[in-house]
Amino acid sequence: MTKKTFNEYQPDIVTPPGETLQDMLDSLGMTKAELADRIGKTPKHIGEIIKHTAQITPATAMELEKVLGTPASFWNNRERRYRESLARNEEKNKLKKESPLLNKFPVRDMINAGWLPEFKDITEQTGALLQYFGVASFRQWEKLWRSPETAYRKSKTFSSNPEACSVWLRKGEIEAQQIDCQPYNKEKFKAILLEIKSLTCTAPEKIQMKTVELCAQAGVAVVFVPPVKGVSVYGATRWLTPKKALLLLSLRGKYEDLLWFTFFHEAGHILLHGKKEVFIENTGMRDQQENEANSFASSFLIQPAAWKKLIAGNFRTKEFVKRFAEKIGISPAIVVGRLQYEKRIPYSHMNDLRRQFELP
């Protein structure tokens, strides 16, 4: 990927329109008092315009057009550009004060991944990062991502590295905004999950687009975002609107059984838990809602009755596992992953049945 470095030129100083007005009066030999009489303003007001303490309003611009013959659009544009330059310089000074906070975020990794444009000027780079998050300042970032009422704080992963974690989560939000979804329909989502379950047998490179398309029909935006350095997350779930859910996957670990268990775990959160909840999954998470999502994923992929039959059989052989997986219509990797997780076989066994995923 070719990275672009931006260095957009923005003039630091745009001369105020009052200076132009003074130049015109000088060239015409007209005094401020005479201009004031001609447009119906006080000499004091004309002086304030010239000293740029008062603005040229659209009405004043029309009056100047009549008296000086210069189009009102000229004065309106000069005034707009001048006020914009003042605001831009004020913003630049604010960004300069905030730029040291840039070092808390994985900016270089974001640039290398193409998530963030690169600027030579640190204040412009700071502005680009704030724009990535859709906030006006780091104070607003703190309020949005780290306030006590923010559900993200429930996650130990987020609390330990909020800046990097927020980058990953925000990328998921940005990508989800591009997915056109039907309004969320719980029953339709359940039906689609059955269809997706059969996709676990499909070649890894073919499942991503199909999964996204199917879930969008039920109001769930599935997004695959590579993990960010320093963020040990597998997936996350949140509601973007009451009618659109985000199901975010990192492909951390890359093995298909981890991916599919995380996917169905997150689906469990969507089906079972509230729309104001936010879930970020990493290793070692245990609470009632996480246990419920784990139980949903396990039972959905392998029904309890089928699991009992498996562990009653010769599950330590590959052929038995493969036949069992084929019979219930899932990838054998999912069976191997669960056997390993429950310590029924060592983590070193049957890994050749576990394929790996790569994001395109």
Image (cartoon, grey):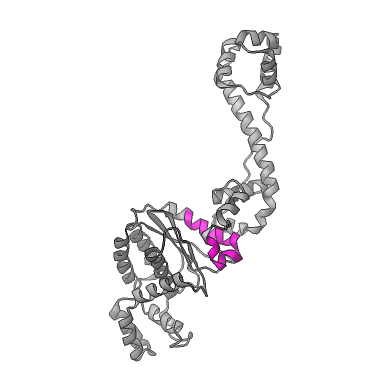
What's the magenta region? 152-173
Q: Position of residue 346 (x, y in %)?
A: 47, 87
Question: x, y percentage for residue 10?
Answer: 64, 37
The residue drawn where x is 39% and y is 55% is 244
Confirm whether the magenta stretch covers residue 153. Answer: yes
Magenta stretch contains residue 335? no
Q: Is residue 141 left or right of residue 174?
A: right
Q: Nearer the viewer, residue 322 or 36?
A: 36
Q: Quadrant of residue 148?
A: bottom right
Location of the C terminus by quadrant is bottom left
Question: How many numbered markers are drawn?
Answer: 0
When the figure is inspected, residue 205 is found, relative to residue 46, above or below; the finding is below
Out of 286 and 108, give the one closest to the viewer: 286
- The quarter holding residue 355 reads bottom left
Type of secondary structure dominating the magenta stretch: helix
86, above or below 194, in the image: above
Do we see residue 356 in this rendering? no
Q: Is residue 326 above or below residue 226?
A: below
x then y, percent, for residue 328? 29, 78
Work out whether residue 305 or residue 173 is closer to the camera in this orientation and state it: 305
Left or right position of 319 against 78: left
At 35% across and 59% down in the image, what residue appears? 213
Image quadrant where one finds the N terminus = bottom right
Residue 277 seen in render: yes
The residue sitting at 67% across, 20% down in the picture is: 49
Give percent across and percent down for residue 169: 51, 59
